[in-house]
């Protein structure tokens, strides 16, 4: 007969300790993501206010901030913490929508040529994907699946577009739906093409600052037959916290012509179909002059 373990025997104690450690790690990650989101929304927050908000000790919040500061997400100064907008997390939709406009328009034009009437496509919380909206009327009828609030508002009421919103928990910072309900909706769908954009491309992997959004993007990848990455050149000089997928998982990668030659070489070494969206020098100069580079 198999001997039953007493709850306090070593094997059970080790299992309980391991489970507790796993739960703590998940809680820690969730809290640090929430800290980033709150500081990003406010711009600057007092450290003691963060400790009160998350109901943790000053020592704990200082450790969280030290971790995020080491990852170049936040900057600490005289009892306050400030968001670093150009680094490890996404800025507001309005700010992102002003970034690299000409590059995004060029990428969208190339991406639009890959859409056929009658297809079901997925567009996520990407301002690059948002640039596809003017082209969609030429490809109707279409089914568009999205978790992006702005995309939904742009497309609702269009006769030739069957709009499917994933629903779920709404993030005001990302203007996107996320969470268990979003994942469940995506698991029941099968689309033709997914146009994914990422906050950063480091090495041969795509990243995003928000873990819940990463899970939604990964579910979208699973739901699509063809996967297309759309990223402007600035994403190759950034970092973000959470990995989405390796470049090799995509069928096509579309980048703008301002990409650094070294980044382009690394892309092509991933053995994916790389398409270059041409941006005129005049457009690039205008973008730089208005301070819209990443």
Image (cartoon, rainbow, N blue to C red):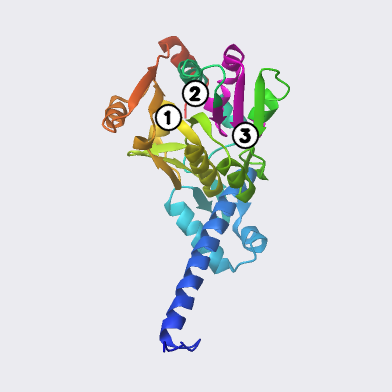
Q: Residue drawn 52% across and 42% down?
A: 219
Label 1 vs label 2: CA separation?
A: 8 Å
User: Along the polypeptide, which appears first: circle 3 or circle 1?
Assistant: 3
Q: Determine the CA span between mark 2 and mark 3.
A: 20 Å
Check whether the beta carbons of the residues at disc 1 and disc 2 lie within 8 A of each other: yes
Outermost residue to the right: 157
Q: Is residue 100 above or below residue 66?
A: above
Residue at image point 55% right, 48% down: 212
Q: Is-magenta flag for residue 167?
A: no
Closer to the camera, 249 or 124? 249
Q: Which mark is residue 270?
A: none
Of callouts 2 and 3, the N-terminal one: 2
* Residue 148: image tag: 3
Across and down, in percent, residue 194 comes to 50, 30
Q: Which residues are magenta?
A: 121-150
Give the left or right position of residue 278, taking residue 142 as reference: left
Instruction: Say if 137 sits above or below 128 in the image.
Output: above
Which label lies toward us, 2 or 3?
Answer: 3
Q: Residue 68 location in percent, x, y? A: 48, 53
Q: To which residue does mark 2 refer?
A: 100
Judge left or right: residue 81 versus residue 3.
Answer: right
Quarter of the figure that contains the N terminus: bottom left
Which mark is first along the chain, 2 or 1? 2
Q: Report the residue at 28% width, 30% height from top.
A: 271
Find disc 1 in the rendering and name its residue: 234
Q: Are marks 2 and 3 in contact (CB under 8 Å)?
A: no
Give yes or no for contact between labels 3 and 1 (Cβ–Cβ under 8 Å): no
- Is residue 257 among the parts visible in the rendering? no
Residue 12 screen position, x and y as percent = 46, 82
Q: Is residue 124 magenta?
A: yes
């Amino acid at each position: 007969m198999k001997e039953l373990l007493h709850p306090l025997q070593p094997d059970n104690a080790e299992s309980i300790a391991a489970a507790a450690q796993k739960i703590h790690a998940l809680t820690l990650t969730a809290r640090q993501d929430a800290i980033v989101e709150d500081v990003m929304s406010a711009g600057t927050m007092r450290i003691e206010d963060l400790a009160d908000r998350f109901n943790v000790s000053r020592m704990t919040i200082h450790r969280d901030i030290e971790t995020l500061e080491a990852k170049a997400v936040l900057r600490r100064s005289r009892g306050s913490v400030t968001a670093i907008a150009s680094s490890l997390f996404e800025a507001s939709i309005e700010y992102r929508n002003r970034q690299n406009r000409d590059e995004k328009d060029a990428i969208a034009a190339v991406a639009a040529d890959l859409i056929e009437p009658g297809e079901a496509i997925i567009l996520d919380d990407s301002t690059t994907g948002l640039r596809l909206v003017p082209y969609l009327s030429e490809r109707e009828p279409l089914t568009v699946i999205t978790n992006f609030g702005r995309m939904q508002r742009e497309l609702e009421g269009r006769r030739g577009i069957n709009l499917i919103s994933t629903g779920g928990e709404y993030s005001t910072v990302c203007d996107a739906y996320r969470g268990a309900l979003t994942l469940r909706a995506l698991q029941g769908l099968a689309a033709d093409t997914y146009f994914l954009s990422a906050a950063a491309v480091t090495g041969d992997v795509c990243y995003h600052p928000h873990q819940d959004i990463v899970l939604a993007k990964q579910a979208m990848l699973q739901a699509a037959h063809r996967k297309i990455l759309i990223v402007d050149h600035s994403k190759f000089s950034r970092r973000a916290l959470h990995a989405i997928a390796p470049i090799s998982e995509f069928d096509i990668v579309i980048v703008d012509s301002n990409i650094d030659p070294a980044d382009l070489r690394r892309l092509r070494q991933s053995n994916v179909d790389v398409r270059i969206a041409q941006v005129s020098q005049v457009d690039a100069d205008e973008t730089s002059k208005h301070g819209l580079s990443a």
